[in-house]
Image (spheres, grey):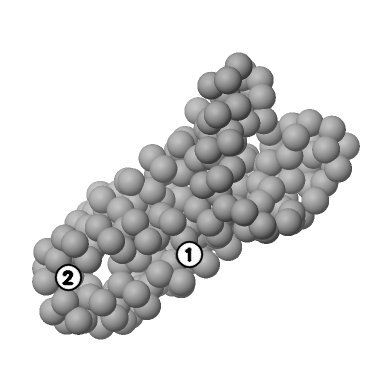
Amino acid sequence: MQRLEFLDLLLRRGSGIGDDLAEGRDADALVRESLIWLVLLGALYGFAMGSYNGFLGQSWMYSLAAAAKVPLLLLGTTMLCFPALYVFGLSGGATIRPKPLLAALLSAQAVLVLALVALIPVVLFFSTTIQGYRLVKLLHVLVFLIAGLSSLRFLRGVLRKADPALVNNRRLILTWMLLFGLVGAQMAWMMRPFIGRQGEVFAFARNIRGSIFQDLARTLIDLLAR
């Protein structure tokens, strides 16, 4: 499978990939190609994300750090949440094997990073035309939310073909999607900063106390109070 052909496959076939997984085909290729594109495109979005303050002084270091962190964030969240989906899926009547399920999850993550990269021009436009670190931070949260919803829709379509018993268990799927979002959000908080304030000395990591939800609440309160 050629590299660019794989992206075309994701965009054009969509849920049809589930037919191949149901028949035991292409799981290895899907895992391999999805991992490659998740790392490459995730790093590309991370680089654009970290370029908020340009490349003067130490600002360029945020771009390199975010380029490494975004793929790690997505891979880490997937690996943490994969066992829960598999085990609870089996208890709910699913029959899908681990490798096809992992292939479905990683291909959905490849769709997510494709959506992120497609939104880079929008991100750069707003990042250069609006003032305020907090607003830019909320912009990235919104972009990840949009890309995440696109990815989850793709995943449901694939699983509907690969294992209808799994995706028809709506309570399980919705609970797992919520779990995935919460884990991803908190992991992003632990890996911060992805962007730096203007004139700030570069730091690869910060104190991990607190949670993303407390920070978002403070950010919204500060913005509404102005």
Residue 103 position, x and y percent, is 34, 71
Q: x, y percentage for residue 68?
A: 65, 57
Q: 165 or 48: which is nearer to us?
A: 165
Image: 14 above or below 165: above
Which one is earlier in the sequence, the residue at label 1 or at label 2?
1
> Tag 2, which secondary structure?
helix
Mark 2 Cα shell of 10 Å, populated few (<14), some (14-19), many (≥20): many
Identify the element where label 1 is drawn. helix
The quadrant in which residue 138 appears is top right
Residue at point 53% right, 38% down? Answer: 217
Q: Is residue 163 above or below residue 149?
A: below
Residue at the image position 59 percent from the left and 43 percent from the top: 215
Can see residue 165? yes
Where is residue 179 shown, x and y percent of the image?
A: 37, 61
**Is 96 positioned to the left or the right of 76 in the image?**
left
Q: Which residue is mark 1?
A: 77
Residue at mark 1 to residue at mark 2: CA–CA distance:
20 Å
Q: Position of residue 18 (x, y in %)?
A: 20, 66
**Residue 13 image-quadrant placement:** bottom left
Q: 169 left or right of 149?
A: left
Report the residue at 27% width, 53% height from top. Answer: 154
Q: Is residue 23 left or right of residue 124?
A: left
* Kind of residue at disc 2: Leu
Residue picked out by circle 2: 166
Q: Quadrant of the N terminus?
A: bottom left
